[in-house]
Image (spheres, rainbow, N blue to C red):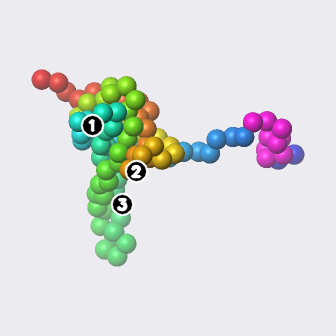
Amino acid sequence: MSAAEENKGAAPVRNLRKVLNGTVVSDKMDKTLVVQVDRRTQHRLYKKVIKVTKKYYVHDEKNEARAGDQVKIMEVRPLSKSKRWRLVSITQRAATE
């Protein structure tokens, strides 16, 4: 019996969601963060390793993250025109002066 057949009577299983790590760039909006995610990839033609940066709008319900924090974010249903991610946890706080 396969896993799908065993699971027919049970509640539906949630799909696996993307989880990314990044740095908070801006926390000036209410309940919203801008998180920058850096990844390394190889150039298709020249094979050089390059850094690709992308910014995501992230929902932060408790307004707990600050600029410079390292955070973990998870993909969710659309929350607004541009927000499709939510804050999972703060992995490292920014150095405060």
Image quarter of residue 92:
top left
Left or right: residue 94 compared with residue 20: left
Q: Label 1 neighbourhood size at 10 Å, few (<14), some (14-19), many (20+)?
A: few
Identify the disc placed on residue 81. Answer: 2
Identify the disc placed on residue 88. Answer: none
Residue beneath the point at 35% across and 48% down: 56
Q: Earlier in the sequence, mark 2 or mark 3?
A: 3
Q: Which residues are magenta?
A: 3-11
Image quarter of residue 8:
top right
- In this orientation, does residue 14 appear? yes
Q: Label 3 neighbourhood size at 10 Å, few (<14), some (14-19), many (20+)?
A: few
Question: Picture coordinates of residue 49 (x, y %)?
Answer: 31, 62
- In this orientation, does residue 19 appear? no
Question: Picture coordinates of residue 51 (x, y %)?
Answer: 28, 57
Disc 3 target residue: 41
Does the magenta run of residues contain 29?
A: no
Disc 1 target residue: 29
Between the C-alphas of marks 1 and 3, the distance is 31 Å
Amino acid found under the numbered disc labelled 3: Thr
Tag 2 secondary structure: loop
Q: Is residue 62 above or below residue 11?
A: above
